[in-house]
């Protein structure tokens, strides 16, 4: 087996662009896209991390959290699960709205 069999292109040819990537012609003067989904999800996870740190930062708060968890009933667990799913859907919807607004704004330029 030759080493050229392992390389998908010869040194004279440029490598293939990944799927969904546009070929760079060198004349493009566009700014990089803002990844709104990453920003929004990052903020959500940062808020969850801050809340988690606050809950376990002192033994009293941790004991209160454990007592609250032990006192939950089945309907309350279902309600909190539905609330969590609703928040995730809300964040996903906001990401979609931000993306659509970004695309429409880019189309106007």
Image (cartoon, grey):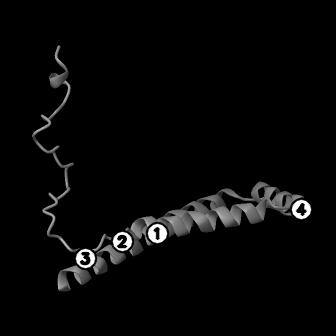
Which numbered disc flags the more N-terminal residue, 3 or 1? 1
Tag 3 secondary structure: helix
* Quadrant position of residue 101: bottom left
- Farthest bottom residue in view: 108
State the residue at coordinates (10%, 41%).
13
Q: Nearer the viewer, mark 2 or mark 4?
A: 2
Quadrant location, the N terminus: top left
Q: Position of residue 36 (x, y in %)?
A: 40, 71
**Crowd rating for badge 1 (residues with CA inside 10 Å; few <14, some 14–19, many 20+):** few
Task: State the count of labels.
Answer: 4
Q: Position of residue 99 (x, y in %)?
A: 32, 73
**Drawn side of residue 71 relative to residue 51, left or right:** right
The reply to whether the C-beta atoms of the residues labelled 1 and 2 are less than 8 Å apart is yes
Which numbered disc flags the more N-terminal residue, 2 or 3? 2
Q: CA distance from mark 4 to mark 3?
A: 48 Å
**Drawn side of residue 12 relative to residue 39, left or right:** left
| Disc 4: which residue | 60
Asked whether residue 79 appears in the rendered view, the answer is no
Give the vertical position of 93 relative to 1 (above or below).
below
Q: CA distance from mark 2 to mark 3?
A: 11 Å
- Disc number for residue 34: 2
State the residue at coordinates (73%, 61%).
53
The reply to whether the C-beta atoms of the residues labelled 2 and 3 are less than 8 Å apart is no
**Crowd rating for badge 2 (residues with CA inside 10 Å; few <14, some 14–19, many 20+):** few
Tag 4 secondary structure: helix
The reply to whether the C-beta atoms of the residues labelled 3 and 1 are less than 8 Å apart is no
Give the vertical position of 62 relative to 8 (above or below).
below
| Disc 3: which residue | 103
């Amino acid at each position: 087996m030759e080493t050229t069999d392992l390389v998908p292109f010869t040194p004279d040819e440029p490598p293939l662009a990944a799927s969904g990537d546009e070929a760079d012609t060198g004349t493009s003067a566009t700014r990089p896209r803002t990844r709104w989904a990453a920003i929004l999800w990052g903020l959500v996870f940062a808020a969850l991390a801050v809340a988690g740190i606050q809950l376990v930062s002192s033994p009293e708060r941790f004991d209160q959290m454990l007592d609250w968890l032990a006192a939950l009933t089945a309907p309350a667990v279902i309600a909190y699960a539905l609330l969590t799913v609703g928040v995730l859907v809300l964040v996903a919807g906001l990401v979609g709205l931000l993306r659509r607004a970004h695309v429409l704004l880019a189309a106007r330029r």
